[in-house]
Amino acid sequence: MAKTSSIEKNNRRKKLSAQHAPKRAKLKAIIMNQALPLEERFAAQLKLTALPRNSAETRVHNRCELTGRPRAYYRKLKLSRIALRELGNFGLIPGLVKSSW
C-alpha cells in the first residue's frame, strides 16, 4: 500500500489538471500560432508559466486504484501487477485465467 499522502497529492494533481485544462489548452494554442505577433505569444507564455505547476497533466502519475502503487501499472485495468494477480487468483477479473503447465 502506498503512502496516503502520495495518493492524496496525486488526487490533488488530477483535480487541478482537470480544472485548468481548458485554460492551458487555450494558452498553448495562442503560443503555437505563428500568425500572431510575437508580443502576444510571449504574453500567453507568461500567463501559462504563472499557472500552478501541478495543473500540468504530465505531473499526474498513474497509480493502482486499489493499492496506490505507482509502478507496474496496467492502464487497461487501472491496477498494478500485484493487485491484478491477487484479483485474478480469486477469479474476480473476467477473462483472466491463471496459467499452469
Image: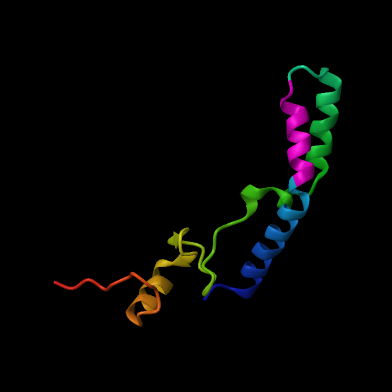
Q: Residue 97's image quarter?
A: bottom left
Q: Residue at x 81, y 25 (%)?
A: 41
- Chief secondary structure of the magenta span? helix
Q: Residue at x 77, y 54 (%)?
A: 19
Quadrant location of the C terminus? Answer: bottom left
Residue 68 x %, y %: 54, 70
**Total numbered labels placed on residues in the image:** 0
Above or below: residue 48 compared with residue 95: above
Q: Between residues 87 and 62, which one lies in front from this camera angle?
A: 87
Q: Residue at x 62, y 67 (%)?
A: 6
Position of 35 with respect to 90 (left or right) is right
Q: Is 27 part of what is drawn in magenta?
A: yes
Q: Which residues are magenta?
A: 22-33
Q: Between residues 20 and 97, which one lies in front from this camera angle?
A: 97
Residue 73 x %, y %: 46, 61
Residue farthest to the left, as pictured: 101
Residue farthest to the bottom, as pictured: 90
Q: Residue at x 40, y 79 (%)?
A: 92
Above or below: residue 28 compared with residue 72: above
Residue 14 x %, y %: 68, 59
Above or below: residue 48 compared with residue 18: above
Position of 95 with respect to 19 (left or right) is left
Q: Is 91 part of what is drawn in magenta?
A: no
